[in-house]
Structures are given as structure tokens and as C-alpha cells.
Amino acid sequence: MGRAPCCDKNGLKKGPWTPEEDHKLITYIQLHGPGNWRSLPKDAGLQRCGKSCRLRWTNYLRPDIKRGRFSFEEEESIIQLHSILGNKWSAIAARLPGRTDNEIKNYWNTHIRKRLLRNGIDPVTHAPRLDLLDLSSILSSALCNPSSLLNLSTLVGNTQALLNPDLLRLATTLSSLKQENSDLFLQQLQENQFCNSLLQNQAVPALSSQPSQFENLAQQVPACTTTTSTAPFLNQTTQLMQENVEGFSSHPTSTFSCQNSQENFVPSSLNDSLVSQPNFYCSSTSTNPTVPALGEFSGFQPVNNGYQNFSIDSVLSTPLMSPDPLNSSSTHVNSSSTEDERECYSSFLKFEIPESLDIDDFL
DNA sequence: AAACGCCGCAACCGCCGAGGT
DNA sequence: AACCTCGGCGGTTGCGGCGTT
């Protein structure tokens, strides 16, 4: 019944492969081809488990494996594919010729994942870290909606460990002011243009796409709050909010700052037809030929469930993401690119995190 | 120069689905 | 139908190299 065991694990070698073992394995496979891993070690004269031989071949010895650092295009593809496929490394590797799932997995865990985290992007969902990003919309909501069910104090308490201390202090101050003198505070807010502007512009969405509007908004605040003690704090809040969105607004495709504050959670950059279809990910914005066309992902569901509000465009290729075509043919990072350049390249994912914020706390 | 810590990557581990017996 | 192995996959580990103190 059944097959014989794959191999007797007793007496089989483990650990790093020697050049002699590699040579034996290569020679055998060149003669007989890969496969039948069960009998291969014995036939090839290797004291290894068949599984170990298969891994050594598929991950290292295969002649079509591309060695060396990942290019911009490859990294771009990995990010795109991961946003669609999740940790399906083999599926990602299948779309990156010459790269193994193990290699991609390692590269993701050691480079891309850390960079995304550093830039405030959740590497699992590919969405911006809401705990870092969304305070601006929280504040605007709390300030402009007196009947809001949002309890700012509770919120501040709950997020105390996560937020930038400066923002946290402002939020706390605003909360106390709101409680202490809520009538006057809200009256002043409602009477001035601050809230009107926020409402008209939907506050944060406008910030990312039209920073000048936010600058105007910031200028309006002192004029409309000079009679209250909240003015300095609103100014500070506005400034901090502005700082937090500058990173977004510096690039036209950085749309995900909008979605978190829009009530309908529909990315402004996605039209209705795309939103209605789950397979909208691989848009024509992809500039990388290794990235499959839209239809190839039919059947895949977004991995960022719960983050449908997140604009996929922001993780897909953009003109900024792709390097200049003139340079893209030799964009291997080890030779011509540095981590700084990659930081620049990945700035499309970046929103400003204050230097004082220890990102390690979020890892 | 030695000790220490960090990082990257090759390799292993354990699980699962498919398929053979 | 039940049992078993194979092949594949994702997660994890451990070692060697490198940089810092």
C-alpha cells in the first residue's frame, strides 16, 4: 500500500552543499533531467535527501536562474504582484523569469518589507498605516462635526502608543479644549471658514491632490480663530497636517491619502467601472512586461481586504516608479543604484513620518 | 585586533494537496 | 476508500560576512 518512503533520513547529509555535491547533481540532471527526486540522490551518488536535491537544484543550480541583485523593474513587479497575490511566492516567481520563489521571498523580507514599513506602508495590505496617517481626518472630523460620535479623548487614549508625540499632544489639547469650552470652541469653528473649507474640500483628499488648497486653508485659520484660545493649536495642527501630507501631494499618483478620509472609501483615482470589478489591479499603467495583463488575474481576489479604499494605483506602476527608459536597461541596484535612490524611487509610497517617530516601534 | 551585533541568504522544516497503490 | 508518498509551498532558522565599537 502506498509508496516506499522518500528516503531514509538517517545518515543523510544536511547543511551547505559542497562544490562536489553540486557537480554531481548538475552532472546527473544534465544526463537524466530533473525529476524522480526520490531515486536521484542514490543514482547520483549523493548522500542527500531527494527533497534537499530538489531544493538545491530549483533554488540555486538551475541554469536559468538569474543571480545578483534585483533590478528596479523586478522590484517594481514584486511589489505589484505581491499587492495582488500576497505571499504566493511561487506565483510571483512564475512571473519573474530567472528568479526563484525563495529568492523573492528573501528579498521581500530583507529589503522591500522593511522599506515599505519605513515609508509607512503596511507590507501585508499595501495600505498606508492608518495609525500614522489618519489623524488629520480624525481631527477634522472631530472639529467639524459637533455631533460626531467619535470620542476624541477615547481615541487619543487608544492610540497613544502609536502616534507621533507631537500630534498626540495636539490631539489631547484639542480634546481638552473641546471639552472645557466646547460651545465657544465649536461656535467659532462653525462660524469661520475653517470648517467650510474642510467640508468643501473634504479636507484630506484635497490635501493630497491640491496642496495649494491646503496652504490656503492654513492661512485662513488664524483669521478665523483669533478670538479663541484654540488658534495656536489649530495653526499647529494645520501645520502638522500639512507636513504629513506633503509627501503625498508631491506626487500626483499618491492618492491613498484621500481614501482613508473619504466617507465612501472609493479612491478618487478609480472610476466606478473599475471599482465594480475585482480584477482592476493590473491596469494599463503597468510599464513592466513581466507583469501579467489584467485578465491573467481573474480569479484572484485582492489581498488587502478591508482596504478596498486604498488606491491600487498607488502600488501599481506609475511613470515615477519606472525609471527613465534610457536608464532602465541597466538599473541593477548593485552597480548604479543606491539605497538612497531606491528611497527616491519608492517615494511614491511615502508619506512623511516625523524623524522623531521611531519606526522600529511599529515593526 | 578582537569582540560584538546586525544583516542577508541558503537551507531546512512542516504542512498541504494531488495522486499512486 | 484508506493510506501513503511526492512535489510544492510558505515560514523559519542558522551560519557566514560585514560593519561597528
Image (cartoon, coloured by chain):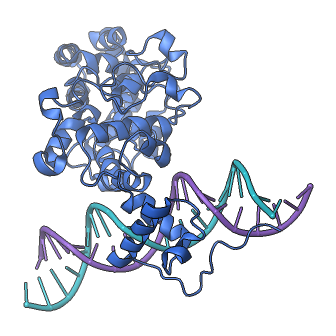
Chain colours: A blue, B cyan, C purple
Q: Position of residue C3 (x, y in %)?
A: 83, 67
Residue at (50, 10) in percent of width and height: A273
Q: Residue at x 49, y 79 (%)?
A: A45
Q: Residue A263, position in %: x, y?
A: 48, 18
Locate the N terminus of chain A by quadrant.
bottom right
Residue A309 visible here: yes
Q: Is residue A119 above or below residue A232?
A: below
Residue A75 location (% of width, % of height): 30, 42
Nearest the eye: A259 or A314: A314
Q: Residue furthest front?
A: A31
In the image, is residue C2 above or below residue A100? below
The quarter of the displayed image where residue C4 is located = bottom right
**How many circles with numbers are drawn on the protein?**
0
Q: Is residue A358 above or below residue A140?
A: below
Quarter in which the C terminus of chain A is drawn: bottom left
Asked if residue A234 is positioned above or below residue C8 in the image, the reply reads above
- Residue A128 visible in the current orientation: no
Q: Report the residue at 50% width, 59% height from top.
A: A34
